[in-house]
Amino acid sequence: MDMKSKNKKLTILSLVVILSVYFIYYFIGYLFNTDILNAITPRRNGFSISFIGIFVLLGTSLLVIYVIGKYIDKRKK
């Protein structure tokens, strides 16, 4: 497998993980009626951004990508 193919797969994996984590936090925020978990919350007249939500989203996404990477490396051995 060449480097371009590996980078493309990693980029697609990263996007899927970030979107999945975002929608999971959005759903949890919707269930508990809180906006702090949502990185971006749509409103009637615009949107709002939660910096805590962005940090939680990025932290969780990086953790999930790290765990998936370790799992993939372990399977290849």
Image (cartoon, rainbow, N blue to C red):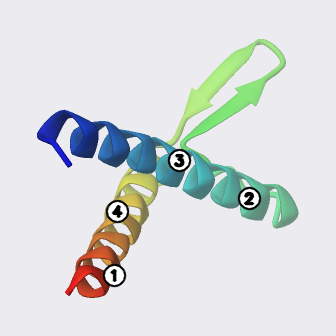
Element under disc 2: helix
Real-space CA distance between mark 3 and mark 2, rounded to the nearest whole angstrom: 20 Å
Q: Secondary structure at mark 3?
A: helix
Q: Amino acid at mark 3?
A: Val
Q: Mark 4, mark 3: which one is toward the viewer?
A: 3
Viewer-side residue, 13 vs 31: 13
Give how far apart the Cα atoms at labels 4 and 2 are. 17 Å
Q: Quadrant of residue 3?
A: top left
**What amino acid is found at the position of numbered circle 4 in the picture?**
Gly
Tell me if mark 1 has few (under 14), some (14-19) or many (20+) residues whose alpha carbon lies within 10 angstroms of its own.
few
Residue 24 occupies quadrant: bottom right
Where's residue 1, x and y in %?
20, 49
Asked if residue 24 lies left or right of residue 62, the reply is right
**Callout 3–callout 2 Cβ contact below 8 Å:** no
| Camera-side residue of 62 and 55 | 62
| In this rendering, the label closer to the viewer, 3 or 1 | 1
Element on which disc 1 rests: helix
Q: According to the image, label 2 marks what residue?
A: 29
The secondary structure type at the circle numbered 4 is: helix
Q: Earlier in the sequence, mark 3 or mark 2?
A: 3
The image quarter in which residue 71 lies: bottom left
**Label pair 4/2, CB-CB below 8 angstroms:** no
Disc 3: which residue: 16
- Which residue sits at x=84%, y=18%? 44
Q: Against 64, is 19 above or below?
A: above
Sequence-first disc among 4 and 3: 3
